[in-house]
Amino acid sequence: MSTTENSNQMWGGRFEDKPSDIMEQINASIGFDKRMWRQDIRGSIAHATMLAQQDIITKDEAVEIVNGLNKIAEEIKSGDFEFKASLEDIHMNIEARLREMIGDVAGKLHTARSRNDQVATDFKMWTREATHDLIGQVESLQITLDALTTKHGNDIMPGFTHLQAAQPITLGIHMNAYWHMLERDKSRLQDFAVRINKCPLGAAALAGTPYPIDRDFTAEKLGFDGPMPNTLDAVSARDFAAEFLYITAQCGLNLSRLAEEIIIWATPQFGFIQLSDSWSTGSSIMPQKKNPDAAELVRGKTGRMNGNLVQMMTVLKGLPLAYNKDLQEDKEPVFDNFDALSLCLQAMKGMLESATFHTDAMLNSAEMGYTTATALADWLVMNLGLPFRDAHHATGAIVKMAEDKGCKLDELDLADMQAVNAAITDEIFGVLSVKK
């Protein structure tokens, strides 16, 4: 019996039996790594071009290979390409189809290359493109936040600590805080885009190749800053995947905090914001409900993004060099975090741009929450020379007095406050109103 009749046509030369059905299922990654088809074809074109330039294959062979790859790209775009689990992954699916199209010359494409450096290159290229995509989406949301900062620069609301009214701020300041969080997220993505931009191609399985390849050429063709200097590291490294997962999870955490506030503000108890119908859902039993589901889903997807980070770190923990099949588990969490964060960024932008902010409710909440108490204490220090702790104690007594009377601080009589400290003058009213 021929060894090639029952074994995998791409790597089965020393095997007599074909993989079991379950082995094919657990071994196949085409269900998710077909997402990298553009990167795989682009990498193969660069590799074939380099092989011809270095006289490892002929120019005519390279042209035939490149033309075939371009035709495969068109088939995938049109939906005519058949992805097969029996061929394991995107690399073998494309190579097998290339062989069907151009014959044995297709086998020369894999000269001086392993799937180990091939997949690392594809994955880095995909992640690099995803990173630049996310940078643009973060900037788009920042534009929305910047517009809200300007629009509501003078609209007073309570600032909170422990979810209790603390000091008066403006809605503009609150939105601007999230702008700065996203600015740091963007900076992390930009830094990462530089760090990831070294090319693994040419490392082969792990120890390089005896062929006279030009790694600088392929790196430049694929938009990298240069080749990775250590071939063992080139095929083993997945810290870039873990880093991407951290950065996206961190950005998701910032969006989750904003989503949580939107959810709270949308309650009748707060009444600070009303989401548009386009970004809300109803109840199947309670007709009056208008639920902030989009914000809740942004908050919920953050848990998934965090889980993907932990999954990746757990896969890498204790993994020996160089390539191990465990690394097949590196792509789904990265793809998922990109999809989830992209959706969350767009949803948050849509929610904020179409929301109605009830600034009158915000102002009323700031006035009723005694948020100028700190300003009152500071006045006692700066005008009466009290130690801050004494001023703090006196202010607490004045707040208690207002609570007992059921009024705002600026509605107290001067005599009431002078009962706490006789040196207080009517100038104190200048700091008691949130509007001042």
Image (spheres, rainbow, N blue to C red):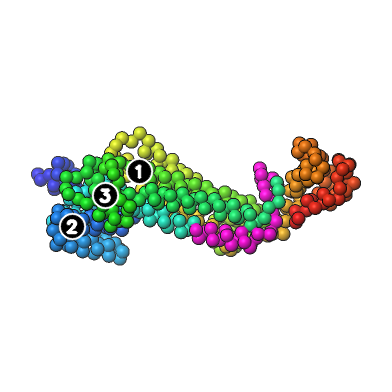
Give the class, few, some or many, for how many residues have Cα within 10 Å of label 1's Cα (few <14, many ≥20).
many
Decide if residue 280 is on the left or right side of residue 95: right
Residue 134 in the image: state x and y as whole percent.
44, 55
Residue highlighted by disc 2: 53
Residue 243 in the image: state x and y as whole percent.
42, 45
Residue highlighted by disc 1: 238
Q: Which mark is residue 201?
A: 3
Q: Which residues are magenta?
A: 139-165
Q: Is residue 151 magenta?
A: yes
Residue drawn at point x = 55 percent, y = 52 percent: 180
Label 1: which secondary element = loop
Q: Is residue 185 visible?
A: yes
- Quote the CA–CA distance across marks 2 and 3: 16 Å
Label 2: which secondary element = helix
- Quote the CA–CA distance across marks 1 and 3: 15 Å
Residue drawn at point x = 47 percent, y = 58 percent: 137
Residue drawn at point x = 48 percent, y = 53 percent: 186
Answer yes or no: do the residues labelled 2 and 3 have beta carbons within 8 Å?
Answer: no
Residue drawn at point x = 52 percent, y = 53 percent: 183
The three-letter amino acid code for the residue at tag 2 is: Gln
Label 3: which secondary element = loop
Answer yes or no: do the residues labelled 1 and 3 have beta carbons within 8 Å?
Answer: no
- Quote the CA–CA distance across marks 2 and 1: 30 Å
Q: Nearer the viewer, residue 416 or 71?
A: 416
The three-letter amino acid code for the residue at tag 1 is: Arg
